[in-house]
Image (spheres, rainbow, N blue to C red):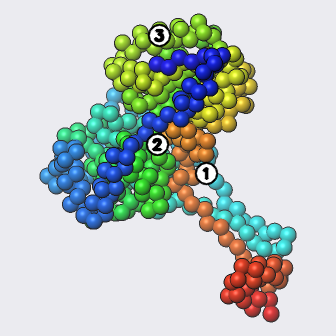
Amino acid sequence: MLRLNADDSGFDIAFDALVGARRESDAGVTADVTRILAQVKAGGDAVLRVLTQQFDRFDLDKDGWQINAQQCADAYGALPADLRDALNLAADRIRAYHKAQLPEDRDYRDSDGVRLGAKWRGVDAAGVYVPGGRAAYPSSVLMNAIPAKVAGVGRLVMVTPTPDGELNQTVLAAAHIAGVDEIWRVGGAQAVAALAYGTANIAPVDVVTGPGNAWVAEAKRQLYGVVGIDMVAGPSEIVVVADGRNDPEWTAADLLSQAEHDPSSQSILFTDDAAFADKVAEAVERQIAALATGAVAGASWRDHGAIIVTTSLEAAMPLADRLAAEHLELAVDMDRAEALFSMVRHAGSVFLGRHTPEAIGDYVAGPNHVLPTGRRARFASGLSVLDFMKRTSFIALDENSVRVIGPAAARLADAEGLPAHAASVRKRLS
């Protein structure tokens, strides 16, 4: 674990290295994915069969390509009541938050008499990637599928690997709650390729979203343009800004909540209290030893974690902005949290106050937990209904309004050397 003090002479160099470190896919992954995409595009279902057998040890033809709606309904009905209630609470809150995101159509006439506006429509079909096996996350189903349905997507397709034939029943229940239309038992880069290109079995979609490993993320990156994507997501991140009045056990747990995702995840603490920093470091080590995910969390903390002591929390905020982290906790009294929040320019999602752990945002708060990583919060936002929608503008002129603005359009066409453009306007002026 990296320990830095902003007052040290070598701090700037060390922090620059922390900001610039990359924890994402390498050239080998890129080459692998390029090959897989080409194979699926050329061979379709035959390639999916081979790769699914190779990677997931699952025979699609023998054991079935799809999971049907009745299986999902049965999984929902078989859930323990408290888990079913928790999923429904999460779904209700996610749905309500994303309904409030829906954009409004515009239709108005300007001072020159020109009618202008735009209409928003959901895409015809969207695909959601859901990791499979024991590491499957029903929360990811809700966070990806519900905004798609709210946006008005006509056909919602889920792809998920089922290694050794294993089905995660809670994921199936979440698909039932969210209203997923199709579920295909394929995963990896090959599943993303099938969604983008289409095969004889799987009709293509317009947008692909959802988390996955480095091969899935790279497949989405390479296929952007063939389909829309939510983002190229890398390993999870959390930055916690905390003063010494926090319980170090709480702070340690918050840091480990992301470290346990993956050995490449990153957890960083900023504090203005060196003694508190020591207590958190000790608490992290104690908690790692007790976690079932301790091996993963320990590797993440050891290789990518950091504790940074600054002269004040206000001084930490420009540093946090440079990291542009996926998750940012401001673990201070609420009035001070609001003041620090006003300084934030770059973060995927911000969690205000001592009683707002990031994990609440992962499940039940309502805002989407699919967020930009790898400093992409500088220019990107979390998943929303807009990722499943497109805007079509419209223009309507009459005889009077074309006379008002038409001459300027024709003159600009002349300047660009496009006489047919100019003529299409001037013929209406005469």
Label 1 crowd (10 A; few <14 / some 14-19 / many >=20): some
Q: Position of residue 371 (x, y in %)?
A: 52, 40
**Which quadrant of the structure image shows residue 234?**
top left
- Which residue is at the far left? 62
Residue at figure coordinates x 36%, y 53% from the top left? 192
15 horizontally vs 183: left or right? right
Residue at figure coordinates x 50%, y 25% from the top left? 267
- The answer, for residue 229, to whether it is visible in the render is yes
Label 3 crowd (10 A; few <14 / some 14-19 / many >=20): some
Instruction: State the residue position of label 3.
Output: 283
Q: Is residue 116 above or below residue 386?
A: below
Quadrant in the picture for the C terminus? bottom right
In space, the residues marked 1 and 2 are separated at their CA atoms by 24 Å
Name the amino acid, label 3: Ala
Disc ID at residue 102: 1
Name the amino acid, label 2: Ala
Instruction: State the residue position of label 2.
Output: 233
User: Under tag 2, what secondary structure?
Assistant: loop
358 horizontally vs 69: left or right? right
In space, the residues marked 3 and 2 are separated at their CA atoms by 29 Å
Name the amino acid, label 1: Leu
In space, the residues marked 3 and 1 are separated at their CA atoms by 43 Å
Disc ID at residue 263: none
Q: Position of residue 37 (x, y in %)?
A: 33, 57
